[in-house]
Amino acid sequence: MAEAPGPSARGRGKVHPSASRLPVRGVRAKRPAAAQEAAEPPVPPVQKRARPGPAAPRPAERVPLRALSVAAAARAVPPQVPRKATATGAAPRGGAAPPSRPSKRPHWDLKGQLGDLRVALDASRSRAEALQRENQALQLQLGRAEEGLVSCREEMGRMRREHEEELGKNKEQHEEEVARMRKEHEDELGRMRKELGTVTQELGDKVAQAEAKILDLTNRLEEKESRVGRDGSSSVRHEFSFDRVFPPGATQREVFDEVSALVQSALDGFHVCIFAYGQTGSGKTYTLEGPDPCDPQAAGLAPRAVRLLFQRARELAQEGWQYEFCASYLEIYNESLRDLLAAPGEPPAELGIRRVSAASEELHVPNLRRLPVRCHDEVLQLLQRAGAQRAVARTGSNERSSRSHGVFQLHIRGSNPRRDVSCASVLSLVDLAGSERLEKGGAPGGRLRETQAINSSLSALGLVILALSRKEPHVPYRNSKLTYLLQNSLGGSAKMLMIVNISPLEENFCESLSSLRFASKVNECVIGTARANWK
């Protein structure tokens, strides 16, 4: 049995310095030259110490790893030298290349790994300290910035309070200045309105006086001409042409039979307007209403017209027509509107003439009572109720003279579901106040103003009819409440008839002559072809 070599035997073998298991930094193992390897004899492998007992046979081809020579071990296993990190990219332009990163140590180099960790820990501590110092500096800056922000907010609050206080003072001063200026302007405007009202009143009085003088001169001239004709000193003859002349003995039925066809056309959708014109005391109210509207023989045009319309409506019901009637009655007194169907003792409503809509030419009176009626008797009761409230007074020409224009209107709406048609119309019966001369009327004080208002409105009616007869582009409807209210009836889309009443007395010859001349102008006026309001 061979004895295994001891440590001294290992020491006696030639050992290369690079055969250490720990790598030496910066030392590379040099490989021996080929000639030197060939000259040196191979070193026999170191035998292990044999255990007591029979030795087991070993295969000849297996050689123990530790039996290799140092040179062979160096030649077979090259020494592990840590690689240095090299920069593959180009160095930065602005300075030196970044520090090389150490390569990863092998897992068995614990001491080296511990040293690397200590170095990394020191670097991290240094970086943490630097970040802490930087954080402290930033905290200090943030504190200063917050202090500055608080001071800025305080300054802004102070400035805002000062600004609001100053703005409040300026606003109060401005409001006081505006209120003062507004009061001055309102006072000035009130003073100017008062002056304008005074001037307007003076001009109105002057115009009324001028119209009265003109009318007086006209009446004197006509009276002079009539006296010349009556005395026979000169051959003066007045000729007039009318559609029909009724003698003094004509009955109410004869007069109505002449206009019944015109009244009946209101059921066909035509606006119908009938005027009663003449001097005071000539019988206008008698012609329109009669002494007793409930008396069938003495009833005037209004009761007979209403009776005819209701009778004809019942006849047309067999053909599928259905009609609705509404009645209204107002008077125009001193150029103001009054509702004659208002309840007794009720405060008068403010009435005015307005358009139905911006796109329509139709006119109406808001707040005016328009009562539905279903039979002839209900209309007669309304006529009696309105007649009791109408303004009348005693004058030098008439014991019971109407001091206002009365306008009775019957609004008619018809429909025929079978034919799918409908119509709307208005029957207007106007009892005009009588014209009279101021000196003959003997109406001082309030009666004088009434007479002036009546004559002015009748003159406006004459101007409107004259403008219509001449086809003038502008028709002065707004010169009077009467003409403005009846604009729809005078404007050409309605059927209009004027009944002129004259007095047979010789003392009223001048007034009768004036009425006949006005009626002649009306008869010569052609306002156009009437149109039915069908839908």
Image (cartoon, helix red, strand yellow):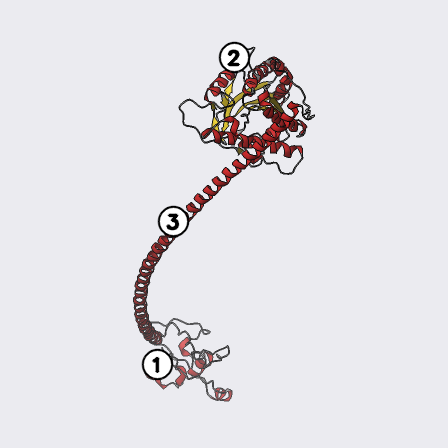
Q: Position of residue 106 (x, y in %)?
A: 39, 73
Contact check, label 1 and label 3, Cβ < 8 Å: no
Q: Amino acid at mark 1?
A: Pro
Q: Which residue is mark 2?
A: 294
Q: Nearer the viewer, residue 31 or 154?
A: 154
Residue occupied by mark 3: 183
In the rendered image, residue 63, in percent from the top left (x then y), is placed at 43, 75
* For residue 153, side relative to residue 534 (left or right): left
Q: Is residue 167 visible?
A: yes
Toward the viewer: 234 or 376?
A: 234
Q: Farthest residue to the front: give it.
A: 233
Q: Amino acid at mark 2?
A: Cys
- Assign a secondary structure to mark 3: helix
Q: Are marks 3 and 2 in contact (CB under 8 Å)?
A: no
Q: In x, y percent, where is residue 426? A: 58, 24
- Quarter where residue 311 is shown: top right
Q: Earlier in the sequence, mark 3 or mark 2?
A: 3
Which residue lies at the image location 40% right of the left edge and 77% below the top edge? 66
Q: Position of residue 147 (x, y in %)?
A: 29, 67
Q: Quadrant of residue 489?
A: top right
Circles 1 and 2 in contact, beta carbons < 8 Å: no
Of the numbered discs 1 and 2, the one sitting upstream in the chain is 1
